[in-house]
Image (spheres, rainbow, N blue to C red):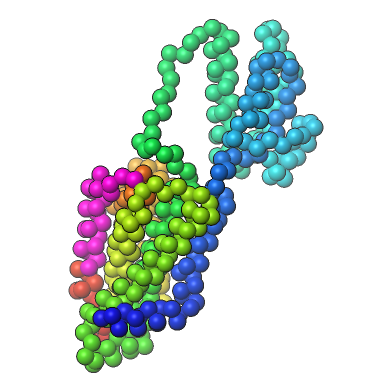
Amino acid sequence: MLKLIQLNLKMLFRQRQSLFWSLAFPIMFTLIFGFFFGGEETSVGTISVINKSETKLANRIETTLTDSDVFKIRETENIEEAEGLIETNDIVSVIYIPEDFGALSPESPKEIDVYLDPGNLTSNQVITAFLGNMLTGANFKVQNVEPIFSINEVSSTSNELTYFEFVLVGLIGLALMNSSVQGIAITMSKYREDQILKRLVTTPIKPWRFVFAEVLSRLVVNIIQITVILAIGVYGFGANITGSLWLTVVFALISAFLFQLLGFVVASFSKNADAAQGMSMTITIPMMFLAGVFFPIDQLPEWLLSVVEWLPLAPLLRMLRAVMLEAKSPFLDPINMIIVITWIVVAAAISIYRFKLTDE
């Protein structure tokens, strides 16, 4: 068995192009999201503040915006220059405070002009919410009214999670899914096309040993993927992994094992390597965008959520995020493990029944 595993590893590492892309694909995504969302940077964009008023309220608004870590500030001379910078995507918004804004006289202006870039919806929402909260507080103060209702934010975890950390877990699941499903499906189909599996039947090696060695050798590659992604995320972009790394690896390998079984399912139905590649992409691409890799699945429409939450990647990512980012037990929500085990059992049953070493 050990010699078979060593042989499979040699074959995998000799396929340099395939090995390169199995590592390069998740590394590329990790770097892209790391540069955009990693590190200590919390700014949602660059804005310009043009304050023509000398009142305390106007100055307080300008100071709060300038000192906030939410925005970067760019100096502009006038509104025309600032609007030009929005058109060239150099800034996302211009906040124009007119003369005498904040004065208590009836004739003084009561509105702030906010020029927004329609292409930056996220930044627009943050800017309008930020200013809206400030002006609401100012209105209460002017009218001598104390707010009755307020928000008390209580986090379910002791540490504050960033979007990059959320995506980092998703990228691990994505890498394992793609390399396992496509790797097994295409490789097994190619082996069948080249009559390698047929020749295996005539040797003393039991077929199950060959398949088991193939699975174990690919799990070694999966460990390398996990290590590289975590190293880039933690040491390159400051991701904070508070949970157990050992449990992270264990559940990541469970994910890889499940997706390898799905790869055998695909290989059992595909006639050749090209068909296996197409069928694999049909499985992986929908899960890539719907199962919670890049955004929480709770944002999906209810009818779609009721389907997506049963896909294999969704519960696996929920458990991985609980283990990695929140230092919680993966068994807090047993339904996740039940879904994963069900998929493993079903995929294994189909693979055992359908997967044949030859077409005969």
**323 falls in the magenta region:** no
What residue appears at the point 47 percent right and 58 percent down from the top-left corner?
231
Number of on-image labels: 0
Residue 7, above or below 133: below
- 268 relative to 320, above or below: below
Q: Main secondary structure of the magenta part?
A: helix
Q: Quadrant of residue 149?
A: top left
Quick check: 120 left or right of 323?
right
- The x, y position of residue 100, in whole percent, is 73, 15
Q: Nearer the viewer, residue 39 or 346?
A: 39
Residue displayed at 75% across by 22% down: 52
Q: Position of residue 202 (x, y in %)?
A: 23, 92
Residue 124 vertical position relative to residue 264 in the rendered view, above or below: above
Q: Does the magenta portion include 337?
A: yes
Identity of the residue furthest to the right in this view = 77
Q: What residue sits 66% from the left and 30% below the top?
A: 66
Report the side of 206 relative to 237 (left or right): left
Asked whether the viewer can see residue 305, the reply is no
Please identify the quadrant where the N terminus is shown.
bottom left
Q: Position of residue 58 (x, y in %)?
A: 68, 19
- Residue 353 versus residue 254: which sits nearer the camera? 254
The residue lying at 77 percent from left, 34 percent from top is 76
Relative to 88, residue 71 above or below: above
Could you tell me residue 311's position as x and y percent? 31, 55
Q: Which residues are magenta?
A: 327-348
Q: Is residue 151 left or right of residue 30?
A: left
Query: Is the C terminus in the top left, top right, bottom left or bottom right quadrant?
Result: bottom left
Dividing the picture into quadrants, the one containing residue 22 is bottom left
